[in-house]
Amino acid sequence: MTNKTFALPLLLAALAVSACVHTQPNASHASLADECEQLAKDINTLANGSLCYRESSEASRYFNDLSRILQFNHPKTDQCRQQARRSSNPNRTARPQNNDLGKLCADTRAERNRLRRQVEAFADSKMAEYAAAEAPKRGISAAELLRQTRADEAARRARVDAAIRRIEGR
């Protein structure tokens, strides 16, 4: 990563106060506890992608980045943190055991892909905002930084996709 390129971790830091994922239409009737449990599951599903694709350091890092973007940009994150502190039984998810990992990866593939697309769409929607804020610091135009950012992120995603296909044998 050069100082001219975009990276998901930088977007994560720059946009940590933005809302990432809209709640599902029927979630307005769900309790905060249910929403927080779902958020924890979604974050873990993406984070477990780093284990599923650990043969590729880039794919592994990518899924860690996606999980952090979701964690720090979800509109309920602060409420869920407060609730977890008040809860006598905080939701702690154990790291999957190696003998369970293959099954976990296969069982969560569709959901991991759905969440990946959702977080990537959020990141894409914020790229222009990121470029406008970051370009003056880098001494280039926002349009040029946005172009570079989109190209760099598309290349990264293509490398991650290729690694996933190789790992999954597709």
Image (cartoon, rainbow, N blue to C red):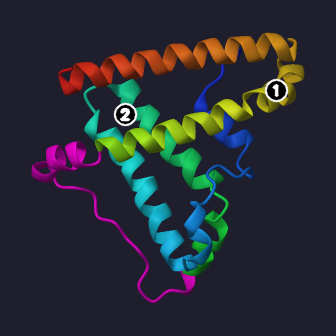
Residue 103 on the magenta span = yes
Q: Kindly indicate whether the residue at mark 1 contacts the one at mark 2 (C-beta within 8 angstroms).
A: no
Q: Considering only vertical position in the picture, is 55 above or below 63? A: above
Q: Position of residue 106 (x, y in %)?
A: 21, 43
In percent of the image, x 60 and y 60: which residue is there?
23
Query: Furthest-front residue in view?
Result: 26
Q: Position of residue 40 (x, y in %)?
A: 45, 63
Visible in this render: residue 64? Answer: no
Reading the image, the residue beneath label 2 is: 60
Going by the numbered disc 1, the residue's amino acid type is Glu
Reading the image, the residue beneath label 1 is: 134
Q: As drawn, is 56 to the left or to the right of 63?
A: left
Going from N to C along the chain, the mark reached first, 2 or 1, is 2
Q: Position of residue 124 (x, y in %)?
A: 66, 30
**Which portion, as a residue range, is magenta?**
84-108
Q: As drawn, is 22 to the left or to the right of 127?
A: left
Residue 166 on the magenta span = no
**Mark 1 neighbour class, 10 Å CA radius: few under 14, some 14 to 19, many 20 or more:** many
Q: Looking at the rendering, which quadrant does residue 9 occupy?
A: top right
Q: Secondary structure at mark 2?
A: helix
Q: Position of residue 165 (x, y in %)?
A: 27, 21
In percent of the image, x 52 and y 13: which residue is there?
155
Going by the numbered disc 2, the residue's amino acid type is Ser
